[in-house]
Amino acid sequence: MDDLAVADPQRLQVRGIDGLHVADASVIPIRISRNIQTPTILIAERAATAILG
């Protein structure tokens, strides 16, 4: 886990701001050299699950 990351990698919540989540490709910890549409959709699904409960 990167202590300097803006978002928590498990809950996708922005650190230091309650109720703000990030659901985009910026939370991917490695560089992807191919199409990032599918991983971004999966991130959005994970964020929706985290936000709902």
Image: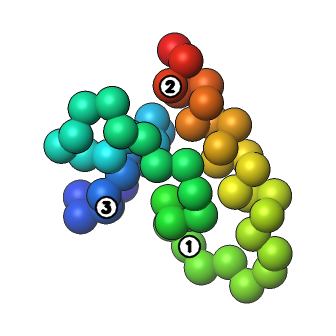
Q: Disc 3 marks which amino acid?
A: Ala
Cα distance between the residues tagged 2 and 3? 19 Å
Name the residue tied to disc 1.
30
Q: Disc 1 marks which amino acid?
A: Ile
Q: Badges 1 and 3: C-beta atoms under 8 Å apart?
A: no
Circle 1 packing at 10 Å, graded few (<14), some (14-19), many (20+), is: few
Residue positioned 30% across, 58% down in the render: 6
Seen in the image, is 29 located left or right of residue 25? left
Picture quadrant of residue 44: top right
Please state which of the two labelled residues, at mark 1 or mark 3, is closer to the viewer. 3
Please state which of the two labelled residues, at mark 2 or mark 3, is closer to the viewer. 2
Q: Badges 1 and 2: C-beta atoms under 8 Å apart?
A: no
Name the residue tied to disc 3.
5
Residue 31, percent across and down?
59, 79
Q: Earlier in the sequence, mark 2 or mark 3?
A: 3
Cα distance between the residues tagged 1 and 2? 24 Å
Name the residue tied to disc 2.
51
